[in-house]
Amino acid sequence: MKQILACLLLLVFAASAAHAERRVALVIGNSGYEHVTKLTNPDNDAKGMAEKLASLDFEVVTGTDLSLRDMRKTVREFIAKLEGADLALFFYAGHGLQVNGENYLVPIDAQLSSYVDLEFEAMPANLVLNAMEHSTKVNLVFLDACRNNPLAENLARSMGTRSGSVGRGLAKIGSGVGSLISFATQPGNVALDGEGKNSPFTTALLKHLGTPGQDITRDLVMVRRDVLEATKGQQVPWDNSSLTGEVILKQLEMVQPAEPEKPAINPQIELAYWDSIKSAESIAYFETYLNRYPDGQFADIARIRIDELKIRGEAEAARNAKPDTSAEIAFWQSIQNATRPEMYETYLEQYPEGIYAKLARLKISSLEQQAEAAATAAAAAKAAKAAEAANPTPPAQETTVAALTQQETVSTAPPTEIAPSSSRSLSPEELATAMQTELNRLGCSVGRVDGDWGNRSRQALRTFGKEAGVELASLDPDETILDRLKQSTGRVCPLTCGRNQELKNGKCIAVRQETPSKSNEKSTSSKTAQSSGACPADPTDSSRRLVSFNYRQITAVATHPCGRQVVCNKPQSNVHPFKCFWK
C-alpha cells in the first residue's frame, strides 16, 4: 500500500514539475538614491531574493542601485531570456509611484522635478509586465515599492492643481491569465521599511516562498500572516491572481520506500530445484531459476545454458528456413545434356527462378539457333544439288561450300536475343557466347559458338570494328560491345570466298576452268586415273583438313586430292561423329 501511495505522489509531483521546467527571474533593488534619502533595505532585499530564487532553479538576472539607463539594459537582458521559458518572476524593491493610475519604478538618478520628467526619468512597470505576459504562460510579480516617496511629493508640488493625480503607494494592477501580482501592502497605502535587514514583506517572502509541495497562493497566505504580525496590523500585503493551476516552486523530496528484506535462501531447496531442471531443453526453466535465485549457486551455469539453447534454436530455424534443392539438382542432372528445348522449358516451368534458370534459357536459345541453322543448311544443300544438276562442272575444279546460301542470309537475320534479362549481368562464358553469336550473325565468322574467346573470336571482333568504323578499347568480351553488336543490322564483315571461288553479286561461286586441249587430254586422263586409283575406300580420315564449318553448317563439300568430290557431315555428338562420303 505504501509503495502504491508513493507512486501516486511521484506522478502528481512530476506533473507539477513539468509545469515549470524552465524558470527565469528578474530581481532589482534600488537603495542609493542620489537626490533623496537613501533606503536601507532594497539592496539587501534584492540580494536575498536572488539567492532564494537561484536555489529554486531560476535563471536570475540581478541589478542593484541602477540608473535609468542600467535599468533598461537589465530589463532588456531579462526579456531576451523569456523566450522558451515556462515560468517568469519579477521582484522589485525600491521607490515606486503611481500617476494617473499608472505605476512607475524609480531609478537612483531620478529627480522628477516636473511632470515632463516622469516619462524620461522613470520606468513604467507595465514595460516588464507586458513582456512577461506576452512570452510566458505563468508569471509571478512581487513589488516591494509602496514606501513613503519624497520624489512623489516633489512631483505633486510641481503639478500644482493637478497634484491629485499623484497617488500614495502603487495603483492596483489587473493580472492577465496565468499571472499573479503581489504588493507589499494594499494599493494606495504606504509600506513600512521595518527595523531589520530586510523589509517585513521581503522577510516573509524569503521565509515562505518555495515551501516544499505547497502552492504559491498558500505561500502568500503565510506571508500575509507574518507581515500583519510584524507590523502589528499596520500593513496588509495584497495580491491579485488569475493563475489557472497550482504553481509549486519546490517539490517534496521523495523518500524511496525501503525494499522488504528477502527471505533467506535454503541451499538444499535450491539444489533440489536445480537438479530437477538442469537437463531441460527449454529456456523457460532456466529463466525461472534465475528469477528465483538471481545470485544462486548455479546462476552462471543457467545463463550459459540459456545462451546454448538460443544458439541451437537459431541454427535449427535457419536449417528449416533453407530450401531443399536436392530435387532440383537431380532434375537438372537428368536433362543437362538434352538436345530438345522442351526439356529445358519443362525445367523453367517447375523452377522459374531456379539455380540453373539462366543456363536453361541459354540452352534453349542455342538449340533453337542450331535447329534453324540445320534447316537452312539442308535447304542450301538441296539448292546446291539442284544447281549442280543443272550446271555440271569438272570435278577437279569444284570446291563449293554448301553453306554459302546460309552466308547470304546472314545479313538479314535479326539480332540474337540473349535469354537473361538485360538487367542481370552475364557471366564471362555467357558474354563470350552471346558475342560469338552476334559476330556470326553480322558475317564476322568466329567458327563454332562455344563460349571460348580465342584468337579467331578476337580477329572477328577486330574485323567488325574495322568494317563498322568503331574504335574498340579492347578485344575481350564486354557488355558495351555486345550492345553495339546487337544494334548492328545486315552483313558488316565482307564475304570471304575459298580457293577456286570468286565473289559475284554477293555470292561465292566456283570458278569454271577451260576444258583441257586434246593434246593434254591424254595426260590429264592419265593423271586422273592415277589419282582415282589412289582414292581410299573411306575418305573420312584423309578429308578432315579439307573441310571447315561455320556455326550454322552441318555439311560441307570439297574435292579430295585423288580428284573425287567428298561430302562431310559436321560432328554433332558421340552418336553422330565426323563422317565423310564419296559423292
Image (spheres, rainbow, N blue to C red):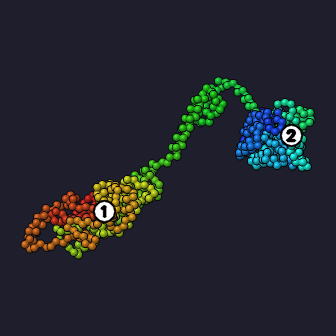
**Residue drawn where x is 58% and y is 34% of the image:** 306
The x and y percentages for residue 558 are 21, 65
**Residue in the foreground of this view, choosing between 307 and 2:** 2
Tell me if 529 is positioned left or right of 29 in this view. Answer: left
- In the image, residue 115 sits, relative to residue 499, either above or below, namely above
**Residue in the foreground of this view, choosing between 534 and 133:** 133
Helix, strand or loop for disc 2 = helix
Residue 573, image quadrant: bottom left
**Residue drawn where x is 76% and y is 35% of the image:** 50
**Residue in the foreground of this view, choosing between 221 and 438:** 221
**Residue drawn where x is 34% and y is 62% of the image:** 470
Considering the image in quadrants, where does the C terminus appear?
bottom left
Q: Mark 2: which amino acid?
A: Pro
Q: Residues within 10 Å of mark 2 (few under 14, many from 20)?
A: few
The x and y percentages for residue 209 are 81, 36
Helix, strand or loop for disc 1 = helix
- In the image, residue 91 sits, relative to residue 445, either above or below, namely above
**Residue drawn where x is 10% and y is 69% of the image:** 525
Residue 309, image quadrant: top right
Q: Mark 1: which amino acid?
A: Lys
Residue 233, image quadrant: top right
Query: Mark on residue 411?
Result: none
The x and y percentages for residue 104 are 82, 45
Tell me if 201 is positioned left or right of 356 in this view. Answer: right
Considering the image in quadrants, where does the N terminus appear?
top right
In this figure, which residue is indicated by the disc labeled 2? 150
**Residue in the foreground of this view, choosing between 130 and 461:** 130
In this figure, which residue is indicated by the disc labeled 1? 466
Q: How many marks?
A: 2
